[in-house]
Image (cartoon, coloured by chain):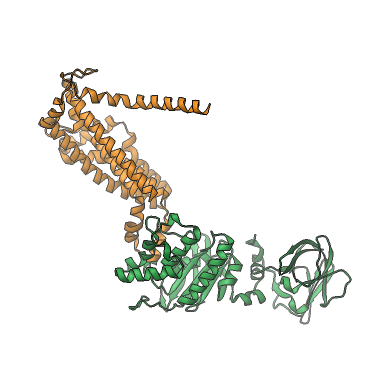
Chain colours: A orange, B green
Amino acid sequence: MQIHTRIVLGLVCMLVAVWLVAPTLVVIPMSFNENKSLAFPPVGFSWQWYENFLTNPEWSSSFFNSLKVASLVAVVATVLGTLAAFGLDRMRNVTTSGFLRMLLITPMVVPGVVLAIGIYAVYLDTRLVGTLTGFVLAHTILAIPFVLIAVSASLEVFDKRLETAAASCGAGRLTAFRTVTLPLILPGILSGLLFAFVTSFDEIIVALFISNPYLKTLPVQIFTSITRDADPTVAAVGTILFLATSFIIAGGLLLGNRQRKG
Amino acid sequence: MTSISATGAPARGAAIDIVSASKRYGGFVALDNVSLHIEAGEFMTLLGPSGSGKTTTLNVVAGFTEVTSGNLDVGGASMVGTPAHKRNIGVVFQHYALFPHMNVGRNVAYPLTLRGIGRAEREKRVARALDMVKMADFAHRYPSELSGGQQQRVALARAIVFDPPILLMDEPLGALDKKLREWLQLEIKRIHRELGTTFVYVTHDQEEALVLSDRIAVFNQGKIEQIGTGRQLYDEPATLFVGKFIGDSTVLRGDVRTSGEETAIAVAGETVVTRKRLPGTMKPVMLLRPEKLSLTRPGQAANGRNRLPGQITEAIYLGSGSKYEVRLRDGSTAIVRSPLEAEIFAIGDAVSLTFAETDAKLLADDGRADLTLT
C-alpha cells in the first residue's frame, strides 16, 4: 500500500513536471531544423541557426543590448531596492511605511501595457525612446519591487539585536551595517539581483514601445523576427537562454545549500 | 576615556554615577528619578521584577537608551549624548547575540578588529579571553554548533576581550537550565575577581543576586527600593517589597495597637508583640524570616512571647532541614524552616507558631509591595 501510494505520487509528479517543462523543451529540437520553418517535429539536423545567431548583427547586437541593459538594471535596482527595503524596515510609522511599500510595488501590479503607454508618452517628450538611459530607467522601475520583496524578506528574519551587540563592541551604525547586517541579508540581496536581471532581460511589453531601429533588446528582436518570418533562429536563441538560465538557477541553488550548511 | 592601555594589560574598573535619571516613554515612566552610585570594580546587581526599570537602567549605562532627564557619569566623565559604540563598555545579552556568520574566534576578535588592533596582538587577546571562559578549543566552531551555555561563554569572552572598564550583563543566564546556571554563576564570579572590572548585572532571580553580588539594588516600579549587600537586604529590608522579594518571608497583618515603644498586632484573635515602633502614621506589618519561626505542638512550652495557632498545609524535606507552610487562622500562610534536629510535623497537624519579639521586622504596609509579585 505504502509503495503503491509512492509510485502513484511519483507518476503524478512526473506528469506535472513534463507538462510544465515540455513547451520549453520543444524549442530544443526545433533549433536544429534543416528547413527554414518552425514546424514540429523538425526535419534533418543542422547548426545553421546557431551560426546565424552569432554572425547576424541584428541578433548579436540585440543580445548584447539586452545584456547591457539587464546588467545595469540589476545593479541600479539592487542598490535602490535594498536601500528602500532597509529604510522601510526601520521606519517607526507603520502606516507610512506600508503605504510607501505599496507604492514601490505598484509597477508589479499595474498591467504592463498601461505602464508601457505611460512611459512611452513621457519618453516621446523627453527623447528617451531608443536610448540606453531610457531602457535602464524603465526596467529599473519594473525590477525594484522584486528586489524590495526579496531584501525585505531577509530583513524580516534578521535579528536587529545583533546591531545593538555590534554597537556594544564599538561599531558605528555604518560599520555595523557593513560587517553584520549586510553579510546576513546578502542571500536576499543576491536573489533580488538575480530577479532584477531576469526581469529586465526578458521584459517585452515596455521594450516594444520604447525600442527603435537603433536600440532593440533581444525579446523585441525575437518578437519582430517571429511575426515577420518564421525564423528558426528564435528556437536557437530560446535553447541558449534555456540552458543559460538553467545553469544560473542550478548554481544559485547549490550556493544556497552550501550557505545554509555553513 | 582610554581604557585600552598600550601594554594590553587589563584596565581596572570604572565607577558609575547615575544621578536623578528618569526615562519616560509617552505616559509610561520606566525610570523615576533613580540615583545609583557603583564603585569601581564592584559587582552590582540590579534586581527586580519585569518592568521594574532594571533593564532600562542597564540600557542607559550601555547607551542603548538616553535618559529623559538626569545624568550619567562613567569614570568621572558625563556620558549623556555619547553613542553606545563610543562608550567602550562590554555588554552580555540574554539572547547571546553572537554573529551567526562568524566563527567563535572572529566573534571574539570583532571588537579588537574595530579598534584597529594588529593581528598578532589580536590573536593573543582572543586566546586569552577564550581561555578565561574555557572555550579555547571552540575557536573554529560557528555559534549554531554550540549549546546555549557555550554561546553565552563566547559572548562573555567577546565582551571582555577589549578590556572594558565596565561589563554589563542583562539576565545572561536567563535562558539556561538550573545546573548550568549555578555553574556559570561561579564562573562569572571568578572572572570578576580576576579582571577587577566593574560588573553590573541585571536579574529577576534573587538567589542569583545573592550568590553573585557585592551589592544589590532592588528595583520596583521604576524606582530603587533599597541598595545594600545581600545580608543587609535580607536582615534589614527597608520596605515590605524588599522583604518579600529577597528570600522567603511571612507577613502578619491585623489591627494595630501601639503603646510606648511597643507595637501589637492582632492576628485572628491572638496578639503578637514587637518592641519596635514605626515613625509617622504608616500602617505597620510584621515580617518574619522562615528560620526565625519555630513550631511546637499546641499547649507545649516554648520560648518567645508570641504564639499563633495554625495548621500544617505543606511539609517539605530539604535534606539540611525541613520547610513547612502553615495556614494561620486569618487565612494567611507562614513559611517555617526548621533545623534537622527539630521535631517532624506532618500535613494536617495542628501547631503553634512561635517567635521572639526581637525577630519580627516592622515595616510599612505600602500598596506597592504586592502588585508585581507573582
- The residue closer to the viewer here, B211 or A126, is B211
Asked which quadrant contains residue A12, the reply is top left
User: Residue B279: x percent and y percent?
Assistant: 70, 78
- Residue B45's image quarter? bottom right
Q: Is residue B185 left or right of residue A42?
A: right
User: Can residue A222 be seen in the rendering of this structure?
Assistant: yes
Instruction: Name the residue at 64% across, 65% down.
Output: B368
Q: Between residue A94 and residue B248, name the one nearer to us.
A: B248
List x then y, in percent, for residue B347.
80, 60
Q: How many tags in the picture?
A: 0
What residue sits 31% from the left and 38% below the top? A250
Residue B68 picture location, percent across and down: 46, 66
Q: Relative to residue B349, is residue B305 depicted above or below?
A: below
Position of B203 with respect to A226 (left or right) is right
Residue B285 in sight here: no
Image position of B43 with respect to A233: above or below: below
Q: Is residue B250 left or right of residue B145?
A: right
Q: Where residue B55 appears, x then y in whole percent?
A: 51, 64
